[in-house]
Amino acid sequence: MASGGSAIRGSRVGSGPMGEQDRGYHADRIAISYWDALGNETVRYFAANLPEEEIPEVIDSPSTGLPAGRDKDNPPQLQRTEPYKTHLAYVKERRTEQEAEQILDDALQQLRERRGTAQPA
């Protein structure tokens, strides 16, 4: 059996004799380190000409999921999430017990009128 395989076997498409030099101009970039509450460091790279206000102060750490900030000595803490509230809990925040009773009485009266079972007042 003759070994007449392909000349490009094992080489990357687009690679040439000069390798990475043919890939074009590499933009200047800066490395910014972020630390989470567990002390893990994450490095993100940004374009060197990016304005400082566009570089985020806090990111999510890819290893822990915790927020990570640029200050190593004072990393951001995980924000406490509010527990899930039901619709009833929100309603109870907005209404007093007397208002709730009045709304319920009005709704029951309307229902009875539609069914024809309302008693004359």
Image (tube, helix red, strand yellow):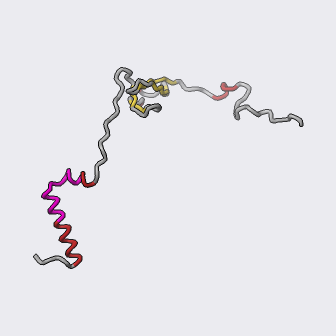
Prevailing SS of the magenta stretch: helix
Which residues fall within the magenta stretch?
A: 90-104
Tell me residue 54's x, y (percent). Answer: 41, 31
Q: Is residue 103 magenta?
A: yes
Q: Quadrant of residue 97?
A: bottom left
Q: Nearer the viewer, residue 54 or 70?
A: 70
Q: Is residue 15 magenta?
A: no
Q: Position of residue 36 (x, y in %)?
A: 40, 27
Residue 76 vs residue 88: left or right? right
Q: How many marks?
A: 0
Q: Residue furthest top?
A: 73
Compared with 13, 84 (above or below) is: below
| Quarter of the image where one finds residue 121 | bottom left
Residue furthest out toward the right: 1
- Residue 37 point in image, percent of width and height: 38, 27
Q: Hey, which residue is sitting farthest left in the picture?
A: 121
Where residue 42 appears, as percent x and y from the top left, is 46, 26
Q: Is residue 102 above or below residue 82?
A: below
Q: Residue 45, relative to residue 1: is it above or below?
A: above
Residue at x-position 22% and y-position 54%: 91
Q: Quadrant of the N terminus?
A: top right
The residue lying at 20 percent from left, 71 percent from top is 110
Q: Which residue is depicted at the point 14% across and 77% down? A: 119
Does 91 sit left or right of 51 as displayed? left
Q: Would residue 60 appear left or right of 82 to someone viewing this image?
A: right
